[in-house]
Amino acid sequence: MMNRLLKSSWLGILLIGVLLMIWELSGVFEWISPLSFPRMSAVVAMLGQLIWSGELLRELGSSLWRMFTGYFLGIALGVLIGLLMGSFRAIYNLLEPITEILRPIPSPAYVPIAILFLGIDDEMKIFMIAFSAFFPVLLNTYSGVRSVDPVLTQTAATFGVKGSRLLWQVVLPSAAPFIFTGMRVSLAVALIVMVISEMVAASNGVGYFVLAAQRGFKVREMFAGVVTLAVVGYVLNRVFLAIENRVLAWYHGYTQQQKN
């Protein structure tokens, strides 16, 4: 029974349940001051009130619109430029130095510069999200293109598949597992930068909601916003994995066959 539990995915859920129980007990027995760390049940009750009133859903809707707009812009540019850098040495030599200069700088450091050029409206937040989502996809796409088996490209060329057709019909599908890895990393980064940009300069959104609640000493509302972000992040990751498994079913089937 214990061995079966250790190998089951329910083990992680059990750990979350234990941590939530400890959270609740810490409030019941006042191991931590409830003024700064309210009981889990109180946070859940506040979360329900905020959802019922529609306030939290409005804030979440604004945040997700910014996030997905910037995210899809970032991955589109990342895939395109990554394909070009991986396929053409001249483009790689042109863009690699500036990529390695800009990439190590933490994305939040660009927020003041983005505010100077784009103001504090949605354009700034979308730009920051797109910028942060761009680099993981770019690097993984480049690595995927460089990892394509030369036999595939040579065989395709033998059958007359060349130029842009070779890029889209052979190289891109072969690099897809790498690209999806970059997209998954970028999804988490986009969520983080969305919250940071809303905390710095916004009048709505979940990031603004959490910061405003903290400044107003509304501790339960603040924790409700943080819990919302945790749930959203988990759901987005599960949805992404489902899409990835669907799109890359051929790849997972092949790798499973190779293991057997």
Image: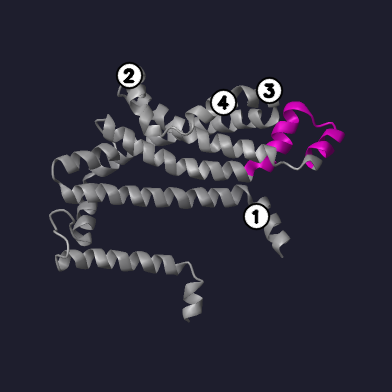
- Highlighted magenta segment, given as a residue range: 152-176
Q: Quadrant of the C terminus?
A: bottom right
Helix, strand or loop at label 3? It is: helix
Structural distance between the alpha carbons of marks 1 and 2 = 46 Å
Say which residue appears at 61% left-offset and 37% top-offset: 141
Q: Main secondary structure of the magenta part?
A: helix
The circle drawn on residue 252 is 1
- Mark 1 or mark 2: which is in front? 2
The circle drawn on residue 90 is 3
User: Which one is earlier in the sequence, the residue at label 4 or at label 2?
Assistant: 4
Of residues 52 and 101, which is closer to you in this image?
Answer: 101
Q: Are marks 4 and 3 in contact (CB under 8 Å)?
A: no
Structural distance between the alpha carbons of marks 2 and 3 = 33 Å
Question: x and y percent of residue 64 in the render?
Answer: 37, 38
Say which residue appears at 42% left-offset and 38% top-offset: 190
Structural distance between the alpha carbons of marks 4 and 2 = 25 Å
Neighbour tally class for label 1: few under 14, some 14-19, many 20 plus, Cα within 10 Å = some
Q: Which residue is mark 2?
A: 116
Helix, strand or loop at label 1? It is: helix
Of residues 43 and 127, which is closer to you in this image?
Answer: 127
Helix, strand or loop at label 2? It is: helix
Q: Which residue is mark 4?
A: 97
- Mark 2 or mark 3: which is in front? 3
Amino acid on which the number 2 mark rests in the picture: Leu
Above-or-below relation of 254 to 63: below
